[in-house]
Amino acid sequence: MAKRADTLKALRACVGGDGLYHTDESMAPFMRERRGMMVGRALAVVMPRTVEQVVALVMCAGKENLKLVPQGGNTSLVGGACPQDADTHVLVASGAMRTIQAIDEDNATLIAEAGCTLAQVHRAMAGSKLFFPMQLASAEHCQLGGMVASNAGGLSVARYGMMAEWVRGVEVVLADGRILNTLSLCCKDNSGYALTRLMCGSEGTLGMITKVALRLVGRPPPLTRVCFAVKTVQEAQALAGFLRQHGGDSLYACEYMAEAVIDTVVAYRGGVEGGRPRALVKGQGCLLVALSSLEVVQQAQEQGGQGGQGGQGWQGTVLADDGEGDDVWRLREQVHDAQRALGLACKHDVAVPLGRVATFVDRATEKVRALRGDAPIFVFGHLAEGNVHFNVGKPEAMTADEFFVWREKVREGVFDCVRALGGSFSAEHGVGRVNVSAFQRYKDGVAVDVMRAVRGALDVRGVFNPGVFETMEEPVSHKSR
């Protein structure tokens, strides 16, 4: 107890009394992993307000033999910000560092502290001709530092790409206490390794991000939202391909929901917001698209080719601006909450080449059905990017303990299908602690060796985020596949 008291005193000296939480009650909000797949355990939670305090924490960690687990808005879906040791892990929350420091419209750049939320950025740019294009359902909670560290995706990737495309620079506290600063207003800097890019997707393993420089872009023309009724994922894939090929840059988002997913969300929100939006055809799935031109929609309806219903083209409903469009898109954003309300599930965020989405869904469904015929399956995702969320719920007759064992067989079967089709076991959610076994099984061995070498060079003592990418024991040896 004396050692613990001394350590807490040292941490308090770094961040002040109001920046330290060490009771179970005060730490509880930070320990709740979003999907309920694990429970966080930590010696303390610290909330620094300045980069100097973060440096002090890093130096303290070295002296006290502590491990630092960075956490942004705690919206990770793979346990990437969930500490796992009550004696040595200290969670470093960035929520007190949330100032937007500069908006430079001449250079189309915004510089903000890492704890600034995506919604803050959107509100700050509301009166400008420029905007920041990333769109996430968790916008009010997700923070810029975490978005960079996880290379966030979201609902606008079809047009704008992942978070890494929009990061102009970062300020990062490294494991030895030095500050790496690549913040810049310049559009180009080809003076060496792309260190900014290295931090994108690093998941808190290479340092603590404290500031971010974001690239801004001109606002698009007004978008039209269209809801297409589709009976199968094969039809949805064909339609998404048609829209990409013929719509070009006019396509901003392309979201698929299978019938079972729509029914689940409608049931979840029925007592709060009412039932099914009228644009969603009962008994069918849907493809929601946002476009800056209706020309390609008209083409799809008139000459939908072999993918259209009955060979007569795809039938789409243009969503009105009277709240109908917002209602339908809000339903898509509520999928995760609706599924969480159902209980335990085995969730997969995978990517396959665009033309192989339907093949993957068919093969993965067959794998699951071979293991258990009564398991509910929910399919949705960002179809124009080949990103599928293939989620398998707990069968009613199965106990929780049985499910946790069975879940590993499901994951292996689904990920084997992904690898066979040339895909990735993680499209946008990352590796974290949940996907470590998949990372070790499916990631190319040379890539793993390079990642380990980079991490070892920047964090010799293993200060940052132990357990992410690798188990906390000795690393499993890898061979090139």
Image (spheres, grey):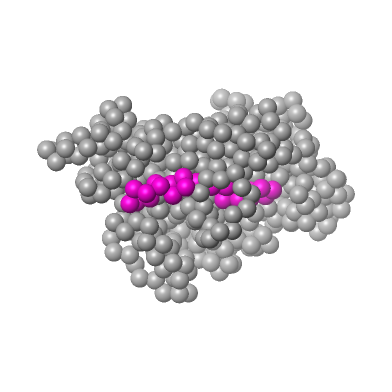
Does residue 97 sit above or below 386 in this rendering?
Answer: above
So how many labels did they put on this image? Answer: 0
The one nearer the camera, 286 or 57, is 57
Q: Residue furthest front?
A: 191
Residue 101, above or below 250: above
Q: Which residues are magenta?
A: 157-181
Residue 23 in the image, given as x and y percentages of width and height: 25, 31
Q: Is residue 167 left or right of residue 5?
A: right
Residue 242 showing in the rendered view: no
In the rendered image, the residue lying farthest to the left is 2
State the image coordinates of residue 165 (x, y, percent, origin top left). Answer: 60, 50
What residue is rendered at 21% in x and 46% in y? 64
Residue pictured at 55% horizontal, 42% vertical: 213
Residue projecting furthest to the bottom: 480
Does residue 214 appear in this view?
A: yes
Q: Position of residue 272 (x, y in %)?
A: 56, 25
Residue 219 in the image: state x and y as whole percent. 72, 37
- The residue drawn where x is 45% and y is 71% is 446
Query: Is residue 177 rendered magenta in the image?
Result: yes
* Residue drawn at 53 percent across, 66 percent down: 419
Up the image or down, 334 lies above or below 458; here it is: above
